[in-house]
Amino acid sequence: MKSNKLDRNKNSKTKKTAALAVLVLLSIFASSCTTFDNFKSTFFDKSKGDEEKVITIGVFEPQTGRNAKKGQEEIKGIELANSIYGSVDGYRVVLTKVDTQSSVSSTKTAVQSLIEMNPVALIGSADEASSLAAGEIIEEAKIPTITPSATNPLITQGNDYYFRASLTDSQMGQGLAEYACDEKGSRSVGIVTLKNDSSVAAMLDGFEAGVKEIAGRKSKAIAVQKEINPTEKEMRDAILTLQIEGSDICFAPLGTENLDTFFRIIEEREMTDMVFLGSRSWGEEEFITMMENHPKIKIVFPYESVLSGTDSTTDAITKEAQRFQIEYANRYGDEDVPTYNAALGYDSYLLLINAIHNAKSLEGSKIKNVLLELSDMKCSTGTFSFDSTGNVIRSVTLSTLKDGKPVSEYVSELEAKSEKLDNVEEQQAEAEEKQEQEMTTEISEDESEQSAEEQEEE
């Protein structure tokens, strides 16, 4: 019994001694040059000097909805570029992506949410109307932004902070005209378009102006010009006229389904020596699949392929294009062929990183000014310089199909320049009307989906 009592006293003294030792240690830390807070910071907290410096580039692209495929392709290019060039001037670059849902209203919300995260720059969008809708928000926030592929000239005109990596439709038309008249030497060009097709109006204007300038205004280089309804009869009539006039090149920016019929008639009339020019949509999977039905038809279209085609265009493929192609295959697999949109997404990121580095600042106005002063920067789709309206000035790359893949066919000798719009207010009004129609369509589609879901539940 006495032994237990002695043990308890011994334990009590031991605890008191330990507690006293802790107090002594704490008093030493408190009275010495190294305070307890400094000790805690040194041994338990991460040193402030070791904190990672991070900057954000926001990405607003349609990941769902009708433009999802295009948006996802651009994101693949952006993410690839970020994986290769993940830092700039000691800052790690973080991508913050938001889904615009292929919707104008959702785009506005998405861009505003990105701006609240204080990004140094933005990339987006693949959607024409969404890019246009985001413009006012971007300009007010003074954040440099690049749209990889949207071609509407109103997006950049009058907005000091919005830039475009792709060529406009008008510029593409100029490149096609040079190919037709200079490269192929055609003096009997045909044009076949659908009636009231506003989607190709700008490209058609650029093509016509280019042909007249190259061939001479008094020349009858444009021998046939037909606007047709998408019926087989009117297609046959137009093709007959092309044959009578001896046209060797035809600009025919029609859709996939209509061209399937159009090319079938061309084959029936044994006119496969003719070269057909079209829009950049001819590089999309649906069109390429359709062309498997028409292996003898030669087509050329604006498409900035990183795959070299003819020997004459190999020199136009930059080292960055070769790197893009190799790294793309490493990341996504050999079977995943890099698209026009992926390459433009990649280049948009490169352009911003380069501007941030050269600006030696994270301030939006300084980054914007560097972009405007950019000269002949080599990226995967070619060399870049911007005009005062934020549009790229460079040669037009045209592609053809080889073994079911778009490959480079021709690079224009002249740099295509975008035309400044005179009737901006009128075109802005048309764009706003189109946006309203799009929003109405979105609401109708949502209501239809909701109704279908309700019926299914019942």
Image (spheres, helix red, strand yellow):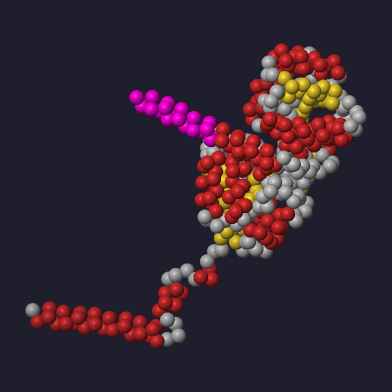
Residue at 82% across, 39% down: 412
Does the magenta run of residues contain 85?
no
Residue 293, x across and y down, in percent: 69, 20
* Quarter of the figure with residue 452: top left
Residue 348 picture location, percent across and down: 66, 48
Q: From the viewer's side, name the closer residue of 22 and 347.
A: 347
Residue 200 occupies which quadrant of the picture?
Answer: top right
Residue pictured at 78% horizontal, 51% vertical:
376
* Residue 322 appears anywhere in the view: no
- Relative horizontal placement of residue 449, taking residue 415 as reference (left or right): left
Within the magenta stretch, is there residue 454? yes
Q: Report the front residue among 377 and 289.
A: 377
Q: Residue at the spot x=56%, y=63% of the render?
A: 53
Residue 110 appearing in the image: yes
Apparent side of residue 358 relative to residue 47 in the rendered image (left or right): right
Magenta segment, principal secondary structure? Answer: helix
Q: Quadrant of the N terminus?
A: bottom left
446 vs 95, left or right, is left
Q: Quadrant of the C terminus?
A: top left
The stretch of residues the image draws in magenta is: 438-458
- Give the residue displayed 87% in from the left and 35% down from the top: 213
* Position of 234 relative to 340 (above/below): above
Percent x, y for residue 84?
A: 63, 52
The number of numbered badges drawn on the structure is 0
In the orientation shown, which residue stands out farthest toward the left? 1
Indicate the position of residue 385 as horizontal and vertical percent values: 76, 50
